[in-house]
Amino acid sequence: MEVSQTTSAALNYLELLREHGPHASDDLASFTGEAIATAMRRLRTLERHGLVRQRSDRKWTLGPTLLYLASKTPEPLIEVSAEPITRLAQQMSCTVVLAKLAPPFFEIVLEQDGRGGGLRIEHLAGVQLELWQAPPGLALLGSLTPEELAEVEGRSEDPAIIADALQQLEQRGRIISPSRLIQDRIGIAAPILSESHGAALGSVTVSVPHESDEHLSNIAQHLLEAVHKIEQRVTETLPGFQPWITRLNDRRMSEA
Amino acid sequence: MTTQLNRTADRAFVVLSALAKGPATVTELARELHLNRTVVNRLLVTLQHHQLVASIDRKYQLSSGIRHLAAGVDPELRAHIATPMSKLADANSGVILFTVRNGIHSMVLTYLTPSSGTGVNINPDQNVRTPLVAAAHGLAMLAHTPSSIQRKALAEASTPDEITARIEQVRRDGIAVAPVGTGLLPLQEVAAPIIHPSGFADAAISLISTPDARNEDEIKAIVLETAGQISESLNQAQS
């Protein structure tokens, strides 16, 4: 389907103001090559929605509505992960969760239930849980600084849980482990790694009742394919991930 | 002279605002906004082209392009107001608002709510345009806006003479005071303009609190002082 040229032309003014900062109407019209009357019509339309505002010095600047919309914009990790996670949940008929690192905790940011899955969604999105307590957190251990890892070990009920998870991550790039939070569940979890520096942006976990080893291997294979797909999308959507990457890099710099 | 609006672009921004409530399908948006599905689809494709929305699992949602644009909303201004606003909030029990002028309306750029229970339970909506004549912060700005803006704002007012008198008073006192909302608890807003070296004000800082929370003169003095600090800090940065 074709784009709306009128809308697209109006949106170009937002991008101009983002790139060049506040400018007067005639400057903006020069940038776009449009007549001033046309530019004014577009700017007034944007102004009506608070997307731009005109200061007393006659310069236009980006408007507060963008801050409001940004506060309502889902996390970029959810944006790129939602489709592969939904597909995985449906393929495996199981519950899949997306988690983010918040040392010494992890936070579930998305829960997806596959049709016909034997397990219910726990509705834990937004809740912070101890990293050692469940597979979504254990899959993120490889991205901790030594200090953070020591703290998690200190908080865990058994350091062997952490050692086992780290060994599995190193050998197979994923873990299979029981949950210490919810009884009779096994999690197959893998970290989503950033191509640029290998740090985990999050983890994907398939949650199943106790299953045969063969079934778990099959799930693990599909899980790793889904995670790979998410990692590809992360690379394609890199600008949206910049704040995280910066934060992770900062941590590594301070570590060094 | 009134500038005509772009009807199609206007609808696209209505669609964008609707997505702030959460992901929605084309059909859901068309129903909610009373628009044709084909029209909504085309607007979404356009917004997607500019990375302002993304399509996931047949639903559209706001996308990372919004964050990119939002980072360009008055970054210097926001950097200069963070500390003074925080100090004002620490010293007073009330909601601190920082508003900017948008034509003849005001919009909340940022705000701070009190950390402990003070009885001031309001959550400022950043997506609402309030007529300048309808709030203390608007009057604070209106007292220092170009005459063309004042004329337009007064033309929209139901009692222009009264507003004119209040604007004069704000110019004399340097501060505006007005009751807020219609809730059970009476609240008042004390606002001071952030004045640019040109003499104009496109922003205001205000404190919303219960009228008896503290001596009104004391509140006026501290709001005025904070506005002065912000103006000075901004003017120094720009010179």
Image (cartoon, helix red, strand yellow):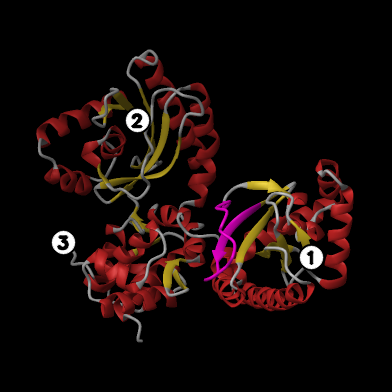
Q: What's the chain of the residue with tag 1?
A: A
- Horizontal placement of A60 versus A76: left or right? left
Do we see residue B40 in this rendering? yes
Label 1, label 2: how far apart the Cα atoms are: 57 Å
Q: Is mark 3 on a helix, strand or loop?
A: loop
Position above or below: A48 against A31 = above
Q: Is mark 2 on a helix, strand or loop?
A: strand
Q: Is mark 1 on a helix, strand or loop?
A: strand
Frontmost of labels 3 and 1 is 1
Crowding at dot 3, Cα within 10 Å, few <14 / some 14-19 / many 20+, comes out as few
Crowding at dot 2, Cα within 10 Å, few <14 / some 14-19 / many 20+, comes out as many
- Tell me where the magenta segment starts and ends, as one range: A107-125
- Among the 4 quarters of the image, the one containing residue B204: top left
Q: Are marks 2 and 3 on the same chain?
A: yes
Is residue A202 on the magenta stretch? no
Residue B193 spot, x, y in % from top left: 36, 35
Question: Label 1, on which residue?
Answer: A175
Circle 3: residue type: Thr
Label 2, label 3: how far apart the Cα atoms are: 30 Å
Magenta region, main secondary structure: loop
Residue B2's disc is 3
Circle 2: residue type: Ala
- Horizontal placement of A6 versus B207: left or right? left
Question: Label 2, on which residue?
Answer: B191
